[in-house]
Image: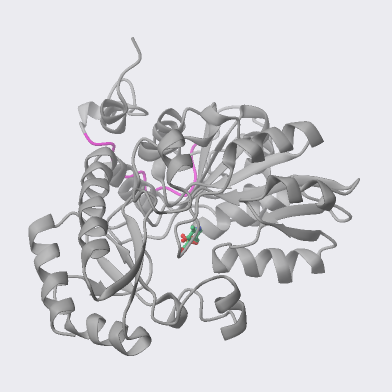
Amino acid sequence: MARHRDTETVHAGEPEPRIGGAVAIPIFQSAMYVDEGDPGYHDIRYIRLNNTPNHEAVAAKLATLEGGEAALVTASGMAAITTSLLTVLSAGDHLLVQDCLYGGTHGFVTRDLPRLGVAYDMIDPDDPGSWKGKVRENTRAVYVETISNPLMGVGDLAAVVAFAREHGLVSLIDNTFASPINFRPLEHGFDVLLHSGTKYLNGHSDIVAGAVVGSEELLAGIKCMLDHLGGSLDPHACFLLHRGMKTLALRVERQNATAAHLARFLHEHDRVTRVHYPGLPDHPGHERAVELFDGMGGMLSFELEGGLEAADAVLRSLTLPIVAPSLGGVETLVTRPAATSHKGMSPDERSAAGIDDGLIRVSVGIESADDLLDDFERALDAL
Ligand code: PLP
């Protein structure tokens, strides 16, 4: 019988036999390794070539958790995303991307790729009927995110896979917000998945890292590109990511439960006008999320009566959550996307995307749900 995922978070990818008997994999702080024959360039053991014992152990754990043949870890989520896109796309190609993307990815697709001769079109991930008109002869890939930021949208992911197969496209998905505990894209037919390992995978807000998972064949190409671009994760960060992933299932299950609790509480509070959480029945992606996901995630956002002024007052008044961007760590973080992650968009663009200036995004941590709810209740009641 296959082992459960929470068992795999602890045991998958661990070196066999344990190195020197060490229960925790040691940090191999060595840039290069003794030459053992005549390997090809990409097989020479060297940190930039992503093949030291720390790289291999953490990649094997990740491949098992995501159900992929192969995995790579990278120096950041953006290194994973840019390296993968640069592998599957060449000058003259065309890419379809979802219209609401993480800001760094949006910048790369809209500013850097065109300079390299790659064109793109945006698609509404909720409206498969509109995609066909955007496919061109040179379209090579389609790129989406499991849960979009900051309104927690869940696109028609099954339709993305079917569409990619029909048109011979490589399908890529950023699975950062869900983590493999809540959703495993490869099981649903995606070709490549990406992570900002900075977030849930590591979970402790203390490193920047990324990951790519997929077939042996696709990953071999992405590894060559990563070797050349040089976005390698250093062994100490590999070790921390590996350690963080051992508690991934525990953390995410707790974050799912507390976020659901907080979402219901906010939904019922009379100063809150809207809550965006896929676990709530009135969320537009609710049915799809229930069908696809094992858990609804630890991310939510909400709007208040009194808009921006009320949002700023709540952010000032909360004592437990830390006001900071980013997500997925053990500490609860709150941020106002219009002032941080989505500041690069014009007010008109934000308004077209439904992002209110007073929207507050919460990345739920692993604190006691009672303490967290008490703090939110106090801050809201003070409005
Ligand atoms: N993808 C998503 C969904 C993100 O939220 C982020 C960062 O916030 C990234 C990718 C980029 O990751 P990193 O900051 O590790 O490069």
Task: State the count of labels.
Answer: 0
The quadrant holding residue 182 is top left
Choose between 75 and 52: the one closer to the eye.
75
The spot of residue 365 in percent (x, y) is 23, 58
| Vertical side of 40 occupied by 338: above or below | below
Q: Report which quarter residue 269 is drawn in.
A: bottom left
| 161 displayed left or right of 76 | right
Residue occupying image coordinates x 23% and y 36%: 24
Q: Look at the image and say whether residue 25 sits in the magenta stretch.
A: yes
Q: Which residue is drawn at 55% across and 34% down?
A: 35
Q: Residue at x 32, y 74 (%)?
A: 324
- Pinpoint residue 86: horizontal percent, then vertical percent: 72, 52
23 part of magenta stretch: no
Placement of the N terminus among the 4 image quadrants? top left
Q: Can residue 38 be seen in this view?
A: no
For the rendered model, the colour scheme is one colour
Of 198 and 191, nearer the camera is: 191
**Residue 30 image position (x, y, % from top left):** 41, 47
Q: What range of the chain is rendered magenta? A: 24-34
Q: Quadrant of the C terminus?
A: bottom left
Q: In this view, does 150 lie above or below 158?
A: below
Left or right: 227 in relation to 47: right
- Residue 23 image-quadrant placement: top left
Query: Which SS type dominates the magenta stretch?
Result: loop
Whether 165 is drawn above or below 112: the answer is above
17 versus 56 height, above or below: above
Visible residue check, residue 144: yes
Q: Give the residue drawn at x 49%, y 73%.
A: 355
- Residue 59 pos. (x, y %): 45, 37
Q: Return the residue found at the far bottom.
A: 309
